[in-house]
Image: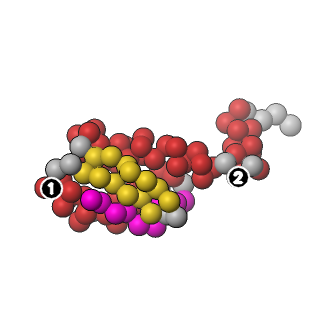
């Protein structure tokens, strides 16, 4: 049975339970895709542990805006990650 490379890599990631680590490594890219280049430039992911994503935002007005949109952002990030990876976003 022939498999394409994408399927084979997916099988390896699942077999060795590497998918969570891969998605964690991709979080900065997912963040940029979710908030856009402008907001990504003034924010920084500080940590991700136990489902909690901590983000630092340098401008108070944007910090407030992102705090109001936390659930929307969480949903979009989880969609990119392909599952319920993020349970909470803390913005400071």
* Quadrant in which the C terminus is drawn: bottom left
Of marks 1 and 2, which one's residue comes earlier in the chain?
2
- Is label 2 in a helix, a strand or a loop? loop
Q: Is residue 14 magenta?
A: no
Residue 35 lies, in percent from the top left, at: 30, 48
Residue 24 lies, in percent from the top left, at: 52, 49
Mark 1 and mark 2: Cα distance apart in space: 39 Å
Q: Is residue 4 visible?
A: yes
In the rendered image, the vertical position of residue 86 relative to residue 62, given as above or below:
below
Between residues 5 and 53, which one lies in front from this camera angle?
A: 53
The crowding category of the residue bearing disc 1, from other C-alpha atoms within 10 Å (few below 14, some 14 to 19, many at least 20), is: few
Residue 68 lies, in percent from the top left, at: 23, 65
The crowding category of the residue bearing disc 2, from other C-alpha atoms within 10 Å (few below 14, some 14 to 19, many at least 20), is: few
In the rendered image, the vertical position of residue 50 relative to residue 14, given as above or below:
below
The residue that appears at 38% across and 58% down in the rendered structure is 54
**Stretch of the chain drawn in magenta:** 83-92
Locate residue 16 relative to residue 64 in the image: left or right.
right
What is the quadrant of residue 9 in the picture? Answer: top right
- Which mark identifies residue 35? none
* Residue furthest left as drawn: 61
Q: Is residue 36 visible?
A: no
For disc 2, the marked residue is 17
- Is label 1 in a helix, a strand or a loop? helix
For disc 1, the marked residue is 60
């Amino acid at each position: 049975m022939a498999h394409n490379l994408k399927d084979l890599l997916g099988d390896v990631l699942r077999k060795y339970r590497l998918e969570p680590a891969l998605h964690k490594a991709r979080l900065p890219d997912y963040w940029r895709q979710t908030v856009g280049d402008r907001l990504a430039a003034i924010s920084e992911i500080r940590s991700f542990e136990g489902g909690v994503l901590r983000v630092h935002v340098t401008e108070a007005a944007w910090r407030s805006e992102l705090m109001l949109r936390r659930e929307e952002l969480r949903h979009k990030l989880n969609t990119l990650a392909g599952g319920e990876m993020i349970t909470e976003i803390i913005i400071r």
